[in-house]
Amino acid sequence: MNRISRLFGVLSLLTISMSAQDLNINPTRPTIANSAAIQSKGVAQAEVGYDAYPQNPPGNQQTFDTLFTYSLLPRLRLDFDWSAFNHQQQDGSITNGVGTIEIGGKVEAKKEQYHRAAPGIAFQYEAEFPTASATPLQGYGQQAILLLNHHYGKNGDVDVIVNGSIVQSDCQTTTGCRYGGQQSFALSYHLQKDTRLYAEVFGQNTSQSNTPPGTYVFSGFYHQFGEAFGINGGLRFGVSDHSSTIGTTVGLVFGKRLQKDASARQ
């Protein structure tokens, strides 16, 4: 009898430990707006994505982007973003090469509590460095972002996400830095446990997030396979005079635990 009791005790501890060690991967795609949440502590996340704007303006623009994030603390995420390949065709000139890198992080200042009115709040900072292989692909600047989100509905199936940022860009040019902003509003609907549908409106007066300046509407999806892999994609449509007519995005996200979260087991 004692052995059976011990066995059940061990199984219970293992179950609690496994549930406490969920990855909770949190993709930054396919929308521009992101929630205030981050993945679990000790979890590394890798995202690869392809963005294309084939029509004028701005010309044929294509980007293959890679983002690595790591949750160092329960509310602190470190970011490293690299544009591995850029294609830009404009005014008769064609440029191919490696893009810039961005280094920064995200702090979850207030965790969202679904049954309370206050939203989740986070702050994000990214610094862009002029590491591109060609002058037309170059960039140098920084971005500070405020992120808010809150779930609504009987089971929290609808997530309302609002982001706003201040952008400093093109500091590598002889004319000096340019200043602008990016604002985005997105709705996420959990069609199933592992499937989300997105609708978004966003605008920016500088080129950010692999997207030309302008105002856009977006429709897309995210589906997660198991705990550590997901796929996303969607279409963007320009609705302002100087925005690109149409754009597409597709991405993959991978997650892996690199360090056990001792605090989650307590």
Image (spheres, rainbow, N blue to C red):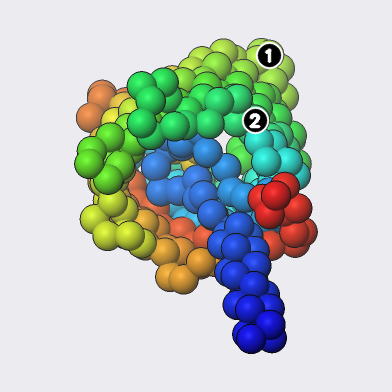
Question: Percent from the top left, x then y, of residue 235?
Answer: 29, 49
Q: Nearer the viewer, residue 210 or 13?
A: 13
Question: Percent from the top left, x then y, of residue 193?
Answer: 33, 60
Q: Is any atom of residue 216 visible in this view? A: no
Question: Around disc 1, counting alpha carbons within 10 Å, would you say few (fewer than 14), some (14 to 19), or many (20 or more)?
Answer: few
Q: In this image, 128 relative to 204: left or right?
A: right
Question: Percent from the top left, x then y, of residue 59?
Answer: 39, 42
Q: In this image, 8 relative to 250: left or right?
A: right
**Which amino acid does the dot numbered 2 rest on?**
Val
Q: Earlier in the sequence, mark 1 or mark 2?
A: 2
Q: In this image, 32 relative to 257: left or right?
A: left
Question: Percent from the top left, x then y, of residue 163?
Answer: 44, 25
- Residue at (75%, 59%) from the top-left corner? 260
- Residue at (51%, 66%) from the top-left corner? 227
Q: Is any atom of residue 222 visible in this view? A: yes
Judging by the rendered image, the residue that carries numbered circle 1 is 176
Q: CA distance from mark 1 to mark 2?
A: 30 Å
Query: Could you say which disc has been placed on residue 233 in the image?
Result: none
> Mark 2 falls on what kind of element?
strand
- Residue at (46%, 71%) from the top-left corner? 226
> Mark 1 falls on what kind of element?
loop
Q: Nearer the viewer, mark 1 or mark 2?
A: 2
**Which amino acid does the dot numbered 1 rest on?**
Gly
- Residue at (28%, 35%) from the top-left corner? 152
Judging by the rendered image, the residue that carries numbered circle 2 is 107
